[in-house]
Amino acid sequence: MDFGILKNKNVLMIVSGGIAAYKSVFLLRELTGCGASVQVVGTENSLNFIGKATWESLSGRQPLFGTFEAPDSSKITHITLAQDVDLIIVAPATANIIAKAACGIADDLATSILAAATSPVLIAPAMNSAMYLNPANQNNIGALKSRALFHVMDPSSGVLACGVTGPGRMAEPREILAEAVKILTPKPARGTSWFVTGGATREYIDPVRFITNGSSGKTAFEIADAALAAGGEVTLLGVNAVPGFNPGYALLKSSTAAETAEIVKENVKNADIFIMSAAIADYSPVKAPHKIKKGEAPIELTLDKTLDILAASADWTKPGAVRIGFAAETDDLRENALAKLKRKKLDLIVANKVSDNFSPFGSDSNSVLFITENSTEKFDNITKCKLAQLLVEKAVAIYRVKHGNN
Ligand code: CTP
């Protein structure tokens, strides 16, 4: 990996009181070796593990521990330190400092900086396995992960200083460095807002039964993740589908095609990039008010046509927005998908072939075509994660072309 982006970056390294602080000495050497300028801030407890002289000689700067230790008396230390840097790294991060950061407690210099931070914060947890897995700690990590500025690394598993084997070992200095590079690398989708839909509608026959399809929403979750990682602001509409973890993007929910249409209408107007991957029923039964009782005679259902949400949304999206849809086809994949692209006024359509032997619904990988008005790209047997990354790259590229690369 190329660590060049760290050159001339101002990094604030917060060291809390854990034995993994010895690894942070190596992290500091790596950071300065890459040309970063590093200010070390420690908690009082960290001094039990590594002394001031070590930090001072390796960073070339006086490490700070107390709230009132001002290197420049004309400025308020914790505010300047929190806001005048490119990146804050907390390594090691004990359960205690994670809990304080999650709750906004600011009772020493290190936690006051975290409470006032406006730069990205990279957290490398290090602690005993039971402490790491404790639900309170997991909740605190979840709370930090849901904040845009905070990036929490997973600790590795192995033999810990306390002799226990399990998760809790701080990530290695090179891994922390690699994460720092990722955070500092300019994000291609920064400044764009995304509205993504995924899942399958349910059209109720009576209060108990419904008509649906096999779409799981997996692709949409991957797209939302990829757009978020690319720096976009993301809203995901989960149609009877929600990701099983705290997603870090805004989550809306709907169930029927009619509800979905309303929510799309309300939200798509703000989107720069709209990706409609939800599988919407084309017909909806007239819902019986009571559970239909079985009898001997066959029954018939009357199905009314639903709104084509994607086509209708051409009037709801703002000018210059990128519009992307999906097509599931059993026959004439390219021709049918291209016709949908035109009919629904799309910039790009992702065409999936569905057959008796293969359905993309619920699977982890897929073979697709990316079709625009004048190009077709084929991607064979790629994971939904990869598909999402490629689609996000493509969407950003189309957006940049429409907006003169701004
Ligand atoms: N779509 C929609 N509203 C509908 C039906 C489909 O917004 N009532 C969207 C889907 O989310 C997808 C695209 O339109 O992005 C194409 O969906 P698909 O089911 O492949 O095609 P249909 O337009 O429904 O046409 P057909 O079922 O006849 O192939």
Image: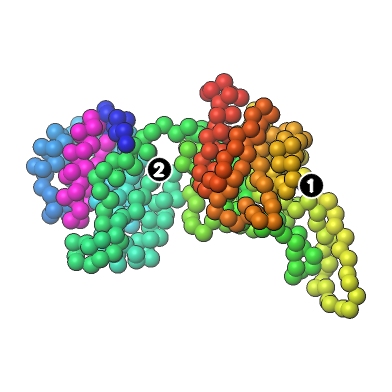
- Check if residue 36 falls in the magenta segment: yes
Residue at left offset 29%, top offset 45%: 175
Q: CA distance from mark 2 to mark 1?
A: 39 Å
Q: State the residue lying farthest toward the top.
A: 404
Mark 2, residue position: 149
Residue 244 visible to an observer of this rendering: yes
Within 10 Å of the Cα at label 1, are there few (<14), some (14-19), or many (20+) other Cα atoms? some
Q: Secondary structure at mark 2?
A: loop
Badge nearest the viewer, 2 or 1:
1
In-front residue for pair 293/85: 293
- Return the x and y of residue 273 as percentages of the image width and height: 60, 36
Residue type beneath disc 2 = Leu
Q: Secondary structure at mark 1?
A: loop
Residue at left offset 38%, top offset 33%: 185
Mark 1, residue position: 307
Q: Is ligand 1 less than 8 Å from the beta carbon at label 1?
A: yes
Coloring scheme used: rainbow
In-front residue for pair 12/336: 336
207 with respect to 154 (left or right): right
In the picture, the quarter occupied by the N terminus is top left
In-front residue for pair 279/120: 279
60 with respect to 109 (left or right): left
Residue type beneath disc 1 = Leu
Question: Which residues are drawn in magenta?
Answer: 11-40
Picture quadrant where residue 203 is located: bottom right
